[in-house]
Image: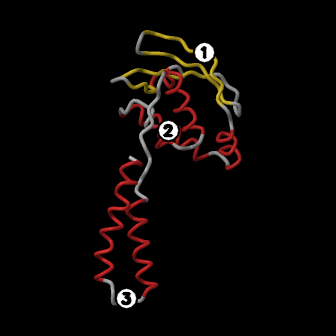
Amino acid sequence: MQGLLLFLCPVVFVASSHIIDYLADMNLSRLACAACIVLFAACSGNQQETVTSDSDVDAARNFIRASLDNNFEQAAGYMIPDSTNTEYLDAVKRNRGQLTKDENFSYRESSIRIYDTRRVNDSTSIVSYSNSFKNQKDSVMVVRRRNQWLVDLKFSFAKR
């Protein structure tokens, strides 16, 4: 994606030279501002790339880190996209919204401790973990679907 943007930026800049002819009647400062706006608009597109997880532990860690960081949009990308999981993640998001600023800061600053990974089968694992803020052992199920490891929250919420 970055390579494509690096290729397109000069192309857009050359194309903007035709616009410069049109804007020749404008004073130099306005012309420079217009050129900068065109260049920034062309080169500053959304460069967020989809991040995938290489393993079951990596998927669990990525999901947990995004959740601890209060980045639930990113966490959803590491989760099986179904209505039940989405409801559970929304509930967690609402609970985090009720916490104090200090508590949210402590979650963001906490580290993740992975204790154990139990393989249920070749496409399902249960990862036991805690965070250094609450230091409560918990576990999350990770499932491999279409060559991608994703968290399934139904396991975590079913045991409560």
Disc 3 crowd, CA 10 A, few/some/many (<14, 14-19, 20+): few
Among the two numbered marks 3 and 2 on one chain, the one whose residue lies closer to the N terminus: 3
Task: Name the residue rendered at 47%, 29% in the picture.
Answer: 53
Q: Residue at x 32, y 84 (%)?
A: 23
Could you tell me residue 56's position as x and y percent?
A: 49, 21
Q: Nearer the viewer, mark 2 or mark 1?
A: 1
Residue drawn at 64 percent across, 29 percent down: 112
Compared with 154, 68 (above or below) is: below
Dot 1 crowding, Cα within 10 Å, few <14, some 14–19, many 20+: few
Report the disc number at residue 91: 2
User: Residue 129 vs residue 145: left or right?
Assistant: right
> Does residue 114 appear left or right of residue 121 in this picture?
right
Residue 130 in the image: state x and y as whole percent: 65, 26
Circle 1 residue? 116
Q: In the image, residue 38 lies at what x, y percent?
A: 38, 70
Distance from the alpha carbon under mark 3 to that under mark 1 = 67 Å
> Is label 2 in a helix, a strand or a loop?
helix
Identify the mark nearer the N-term, 3 or 1. 3
Residue at image coords 36%, 67%: 13
- Quarter of the image with the C terminus in it: top right
The residue wearing badge 3 is: 26
- Mark in the foreground, 3 or 2: 3
- Element marked by disc 1: strand
Looking at the image, residue 24 lies above or below residue 69: below
Residue 101, given in percent of the width and then of the height, sits at: 67, 50
Q: Amino acid at mark 3?
A: Met
Q: Amino acid at mark 1?
A: Asp
As shown in the figure, which amino acid type bears the numbered disc 2?
Ala
Q: In the figure, 159 relative to 95: above or below?
A: above
User: Which quarter of the picture shows residue 107?
Assistant: top right
Q: CA distance from mark 2 to mark 1?
A: 26 Å
Relative to 40, say whether 73 is above or below.
above
